[in-house]
Image (cartoon, rainbow, N blue to C red):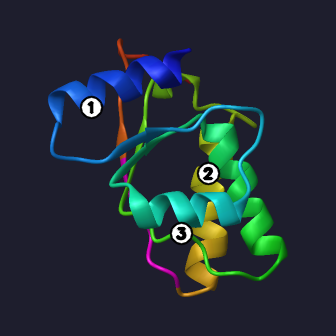
Amino acid sequence: MLVKQQGKALKKFISTASVHSLSGDSSDCIQLHNLLENHNIIVMTPQMLVNAYNEAIEKNEPSFGIGLTIFDECHHCQKNHPYNQLLEIYHLHLTARNESLPRVFFLSIFLTIFTS
């Protein structure tokens, strides 16, 4: 539901871009490659992107050439959350494969103050 809402808002405010909202339980790397060839912006859950990257890495296929990843509600980025999994993929796997890293933009509705 949130994916469709965000996709609709992006289409409204960035009318010159081709926006696609990808929903469902999984995304395979072939589907994502095809979508990236035809759209400027793809809205999806972070788990879908994790699944697609893991499949591409497992098959030793090139990743997706994503230029920017936006993490909404990044205050959830803890432990084994898909956001953390994506950051690990970017840092460990893409750099080891000499692939370009996407820029990452973090959004949150509030600040969290961590104390030790």
Find disc 1 in the rendering and name its residue. Answer: 11
Image height check: is 107 above or below 16? above
Q: Is residue 110 left or right of residue 83?
A: left
Q: Amino acid at mark 1?
A: Lys
Q: Nearer the viewer, mark 3 or mark 2?
A: 3
Q: CA distance from mark 3 to mark 2?
A: 13 Å
Q: Amino acid at mark 2?
A: Leu
Nearer-the-camera pick, 93 or 8: 8
SS assignment at label 3: loop
Image height check: is 93 above or below 104? below
Q: Name the residue rendered at 43%, 28% in the picture.
A: 72
Q: Nearer the viewer, mark 3 or mark 1?
A: 1
Mark on residue 64? 3
Q: Is residue 72 left or right of residue 29?
A: left
Q: CA distance from mark 1 to mark 2?
A: 25 Å
Q: Is residue 17 left or right of residue 25?
A: left
Work out which quarter of the rendered image holds the C terminus and state it: top right
Q: Name the residue rendered at 30%, 48% in the picture.
A: 18
Instruction: Please provide percent x and percent y for residue 21.
Output: 49, 35
Q: Quadrant of residue 108?
A: top left
Q: Is residue 110 left or right of residue 63?
A: left
Instruction: Please provide percent x and percent y for residue 55.
Output: 79, 64
The magenta-colored residue range is: 99-104
Pointers 1 and 2 in contact (CB under 8 A)? no
Asked if residue 89 shows in the view, the reply is yes
Find disc 2 in the rendering and name its residue. Answer: 86
Q: Amino acid at mark 3?
A: Phe
Q: Quadrant of residue 103?
A: bottom left
